[in-house]
Amino acid sequence: MSVLEALRVAWGGLTANRLRSGLTMLGILIGVGAVILLVAVGNGTSERVQQQIESLGSNLLVVYPAATTSNGVSQGFASGSTLTMADVQALQNRQNAPNVVAAVPTTGGRAQLTYGDLNWASSLTGTTQDFPQVRDYQLAEGQFFTQAQVQGDAKVAVLGATVAQELFPTGQDPIGQTVYINRQAFQVIGVFAAKGTSGLGNQDDFVAVPITTAWAYLLGGGQTNVQEIFVEASSAAAIQAAQAEITETLLETHHISDPAQADFQVLNQAQILSTASQTTQTLTVLLGAIAAISLVVGGIGIMNIMLVTVTERTREIGIRKAIGARRRDVLLQFLIESMFLSAVGGVLGIVVGGLAALELPNLVTGLTTLVSGPSVLLAFGVSVGIGLFFGIYPANRAARLNPIEALRYE
Amino acid sequence: MIISLQRVTKVYRMGEVEVHALRGIDLEVEEGEFVAVVGASGSGKSTLMNILGCLDVPTTGRYLLQGIDVADLDDDQLAVVRNRLIGFVFQSFNLIPRATALHNVEMPLIYGGQRRERRDRALAALEVVGLADRAQHLPSELSGGQQQRVAIARALINDPAIVLADEPTGNLDSESSAEIMQVFTELNREGRTVILITHEADIAAYARRVVRMRDGLIVGDERLAVTPGSEERWR
Ligand SMILES: Nc1ncnc2c1ncn2[C@@H]1O[C@H](COP(=O)(O)OP(=O)(O)O)[C@@H](O)[C@H]1O
Ligand SMILES: [Mg+2]
């Protein structure tokens, strides 16, 4: 029997019980749809993180404290607090680091902003006057704080575009207004132009204040901790040289002779990107794995239905064997039936999952999705494979039936 | 000799109980014979027929089909024998309910690997049994006699050397039975070996040899000098 004929026979079997075939397909449809959708969410997130890192600023290097260990257990990336303002000053010294144009420290925390009776929860960035240049922020209105304001702990703030929109929704001019950050009065002196990325990890949803002011009034505990230092290299070609200079300078200021013992790390954008993409890949895999569970459930549904089908059609199998069907003819018939169920369910699942992935960002703000070609191919392949895997046992059972016993079956 | 059974036994095991359905059958059938197997219900007729039709294998003894010992054939080779050499007609028709008459009839050709002229041959076979105009009907849309004729057309499609029928008229009224028996008589006249089971005397009268069974043994084997159409001779 040719495959084409086996297909025809299998089609006859499937259409004999449309509702049941449809419901079985639905199981696979949901499974594949979930895989496509969740992997699209994972990929979308990864893509956006990548864009955000690329929009951090040009020729950018970031210095993080090294991960601290406590009782031999790593406390995670950038968990230490080894960076200080002295490090920033050392990096700004042209003699130490000729390829460095500017270095800005940042420290941060949560910021609860109030203006009139409007509230907005945002994040706080304490930094210095070179922040807009290094991080590629433009000012839409007003100006950024000056070195003098940083040195004087001035209670001035520059609002991110999102924050400005939330606190001044009617379009009035924020410049010169007093907003409260964590119950402290600050004068608004500038508003950043939007960077254009939106949603989760929104780069426009923050408020910048002088780092000294943040230490003095907002973060509490009298700490003078620098969380990270953003460094701008003089050109793309100078990034490597700058990275070496930064490492050398900081080893010296930290009095460390062995580079392996460094209590900080200097990352360029490519390195940040690969660190971040490791995380987002884990996310994607995790989401995919969760969805894959429903795919397995769908596969078990196929197996269940195929077992019922084989039992129901025992007599038919007996007839087919009596007139000359060989084992593999019967095997093929039922395998094709189960693979057809799963393949059609898979294709429909890809369509439904794909449409859901297109629609989801409109429903959930801040979510981006990206349906990737390989995930579609993989989902289709896996669904056909599931039909094969879960179909083999029932089909084999049918193929091994003794013709006489099958014919006697009522 | 097309069929030769030598001391064939068949034992069914149902848990602890053993049913000796055949207790030692010796039977030889020449090509072109028309044999009726008669006997009381439970005497082993169907068991014998299933072995002859390669649907089942003997517990002991030898079955030579066209000189080949079927014990030497594996499952798939037996399937090929059933497909090519044997046409089997059942009491309960055994058509596939959701396939049309035509599709039921061409099914052995599909399993036989025939690609060309399938439709034409199936239609021709339906023509032989007088059902060409019912080709697109489902079994449920046909009378019992018509369904059995479709089953016969299916048995004939691969031009088998042997036609086996297990009580083919058992579920039919006397008029349909007569029609069906006409078909078998015609097939035998064309030179095909026909073996059929019946427990009705008037059906057995169509045959030219009557094998009588009781308790898993052959207890009588008579050849009748029947001239076609004079089925009253056998009592
Ligand atoms: N598959 C089977 N399993 C167990 N016993 C069987 C089976 N088939 C037939 N038998 C028994 O074998 C005997 C002969 O049955 P069968 O050949 O069908 O007789 P007949 O066709 O002459 O009525 C009966 O006692 C029957 O109950
Ligand atoms: Mg019987």
Image (cartoon, coloured by chain):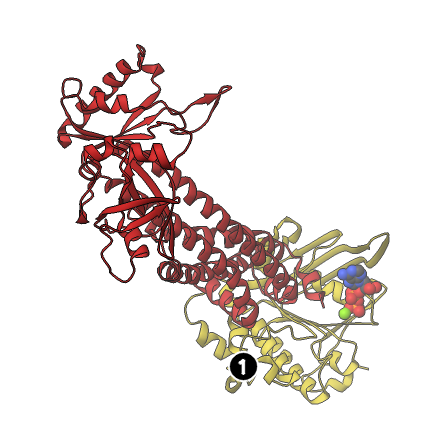
Q: Residue B163 in the image: x percent, y percent?
A: 63, 70
Q: On screen, A38 above or below A147?
A: below
- Residue B150 picture quarter: bottom right
Q: Residue B104 in the image: x percent, y percent?
A: 55, 73
Mark 1 neighbour class, 10 Å CA radius: few under 14, some 14 to 19, many 20 or more = some
Q: On screen, B32 above or below A36?
A: below
Q: On screen, A21 above or below B10?
A: below
Give the residue at x 32% y 56%. A166
Residue at disc 1, secondary structure:
helix
Give the residue at x 20% y 43%. A137
> Which residue is at the far bottom?
B175
The amino acid pointed to by label 1 is Val
Q: Is residue B100 visible?
A: yes
Q: Residue A292 in the image: x percent, y percent?
A: 49, 49
Tell which quarter ligand 1 is in.
bottom right
Give the residue at x 69% y 84%. B177
Q: Nearer the viewer, residue A239 or B2?
A: A239
Chain identifier, colour yellow: B
Q: Is mark 1 within 8 Å of ligand 2?
A: no
Q: Chain of mark 1?
A: B
Q: Nearer the viewer, residue B200 or A187?
A: A187
- Residue B215 picture quarter: bottom right
In the image, B210: left or right of A341? right
Q: Is residue B158 visible?
A: no
Give the residue at x 61% y 51%. B73
In the image, B137: left or right of A129? right
In the image, A273: left or right of A324? left
Q: Nearer the viewer, residue B164 or A175?
A: A175
Q: Residue A352 in the image: x percent, y percent?
A: 41, 62
Q: Which residue is mark 1?
A: B128
Chain identifier, colour red: A
Q: Nearer the viewer, residue B223 or A400?
A: A400
